[in-house]
Image: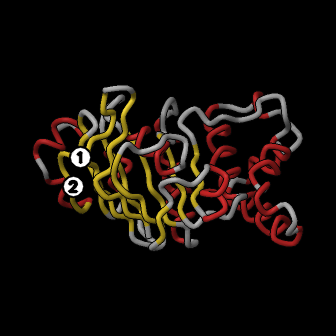
Amino acid sequence: MLELRDITVKYGNYAAVHQVNIEVTQGEIVVLLGANGAGKSTTFRTISGLSKPASGKILFQGKSIGGKSPDKIVQSGIVQCAEDRKLFSQMSVKDNLIMGAYVHRKNKKQFKQTLKEVYELFPILHDKSDFSAGSLSGGQQQMLAIGRALMAKPKLMLLDEPSIGLAPLIVEQMFESIQEINNEGTTILLAEQNANAALSIADKGYVFENGKVVVKGSSEELFSNKEVRKAYIGA
């Protein structure tokens, strides 16, 4: 479904991402693990069209998307949920969700159905639909950010650090919701520092260090890898 071939991204002379190869098959949950600054977010920005690769190819459903603008990439079916959520804090919860559906704004029937599905997934968003996004708790804001991304009916959703700053119980609920979204047919690429939670729902993963993929494998392989456990899981 998504394939990154030898992707290098540079800021000046500095290679933030160096010859990265990633493959995401339809229906999978794939996780990118690594510390802050390891290259995960740059990889996401490059897939989304916000950063341009210096070299390499990005293929989505067999077609190159390397030079496409971010809006065209959203229309093709890739939607990113950014690390800092990027909500419109003064706008209501419902208006934030409406913004997410912009690419499908002409299809009123689909909009209503998708809104219903988001409210079923996150009932608190329905209860607080007239509240401003800025008044929500951290967990609720993350739900809204994911809900807004879902409004674009993505084939592939990029989730950048969805657990950051959330209490453990909320993290658990968040990952259950991500699994549910995947079960409903959306492929997920997840960048996450919480390796334990991420690997518990992922099919496979890639470990980033200094802009390079240093380990890859199934969730089971990464869980049993002593170096990965020591660096990211503990024990």
Name which residue lies at 32% across and 44% down: 8
Residue depicted at x 30% and y 61%: 204
Alpha carbons under labels 1 and 2: distance apart: 7 Å
Locate residue 79 relative to residue 188 in the image: left or right.
right
Residue 147: image location, x then y, percent: 68, 52
Rendered location of residue 225, percent (x, y):
13, 50
Q: Position of residue 222 (x, y in %)?
A: 20, 53
For residue 193, say whether it is visible.
no
Residue contact at pointers 1 and 2, CB within 8 angstroms: yes
Residue that protrudes farthest toward the left in the picture: 226
Asked if residue 92 is positioned above or below residue 60 in the image, the reply reads: above
In the image, is 65 to the left or to the right of 135?
A: left
Report the quarter where the C terminus lies. top left
Of the pair 141 and 167, the residue shown nearer to us? 141
Q: Residues within 10 Å of mark 1 (few under 14, many from 20)?
A: many
Q: Nearer the viewer, mark 1 or mark 2?
A: 1
Residue under label 1, please give it. Answer: 213
Image coords of residue 52 (percent x, y): 47, 43
For badge 2, the amino acid type reads Lys
> Is residue 100 visible to us here?
yes
Q: Which residue is under mark 2?
A: 216
Residue drawn at (57%, 49%) of the image: 80
Q: What's the residue type where badge 1 is placed?
A: Val
| The label number, if any, that marks residue 163 in the structure image | none
